[in-house]
Image (cartoon, coloured by chain):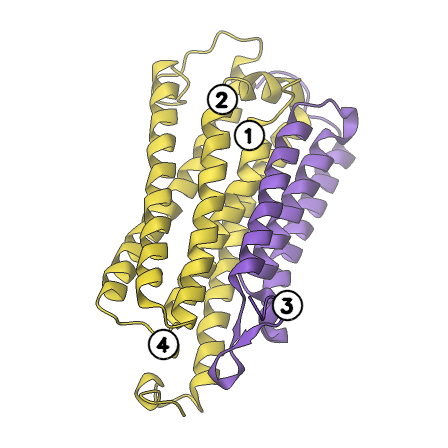
Chain colours: A yellow, B purple
Amino acid sequence: MAHGESSLVAPYFRDIEQQRETNTLGMWVFLVTEVMLFGGIFMAYAVYFYNYPEAFGEAGRELDIVLSSVNTFVLLCSSLTMALAVWACQSNKQKLLVIFLTSTLVLGSIFLGIKGFEYYEKYEKALIPGINWHYEGEFPDEAQIFFSLYFAATGLHATHMIIGGTVLAIITMKAMRGFYSAVNFDTIEIMGLYWHFVDIAWVFIFPLFYLIERY
Amino acid sequence: MADQHHEEHGEHGIHITPVSTYLMVFAGLMVLLALTLFVGYTNFGAFDKSITVAVAIVKASLIMYFFMHLRHSSGLVWVFGVLGFFFFIIMLLIGMGDYAARGTIQGPL
């Protein structure tokens, strides 16, 4: 085993590979449960879109396509920097690791900032069901369903971003103190898995909510 | 760089995906983002949603295969990764099959 490796392996593991495999598998199992969590909201969306396609189209056009496209771009960039952080850790490049982790954190924060502004816009336009709902379009009840699903999906997603960002901040601080290395990179790897999953969730949310009948 | 086409291996055969691969995947994701917007603003009639979701699935697959290292993961990880989406598809198919068989919900809420 490489220098210092034996102290990294918990005693109930055969070796460091088994530990790594277990860590990775554990995160994937969790992500599968997350797929079903977001999946429930997408299922509800499928049912109501099937029943009220015109209403969804009309309500969907209230959403800001520019801000959300920028957000999609920002999130995809953050996935790149997260993947590069894993690469940097595996290649034992400590400075680059910190740079990429920090970049991911900054991009994630930009995403949340833009999302917050979007929510503020919704408040201004009185489009938040249960808080200040006032809709002038053709299908007010169905539009309320659309916006309930919108806030459920994007709210759940934003919550995941906030939790992920908090954990990422802690990991970044540990990385600054040289805690991770080419033999101790499991944490960075599984943080990456979580981050990419949250990105994938947005990849589906974006077209389903923001790109309905925009022609 | 000398080993652009040859992947680095860390100790114990850890696969280190090269930066060039990540950058190419990112470029692909940007193209797909542009495609997503194009599809969103084009009228494909009844296929609108299907094409949109198909593009999203391609993006998700790229992210999972390269960024999430499914490419270098064991069969067990593949089983869980694929299983998750498999059960989601089942939920959609059986759920929507039920609604479609019963017909559209009629009348006001």
CA separation, marks 2 and 1?
8 Å
Residue drawn 63% across and 74% down? B75
CA separation, marks 1 and 3?
40 Å
Name the residue type under label 3: His
Looking at the rendered image, the disc whose residue lies closer to the viewer, 1 or 3, is: 3
**Which quadrant of the view contains residue A46?**
top right
From this view, report whether residue A102 is shown above or below residue A46: below
**Which quadrant of the view contains residue A120?**
top left
Residue B74: x percent and y percent? 60, 75
The residue identified by callout 1 is A209
The residue identified by callout 4 is A184
Let me know if marks 2 and 3 both belong to one chain: no
Query: Which structural element holds mark 1?
Result: helix
Label 4, residues with CA under 10 Å away: few <14, some 14-19, many ≥20: some
The residue identified by callout 3 is B5
Let me know if marks 2 and 4 both belong to one chain: yes
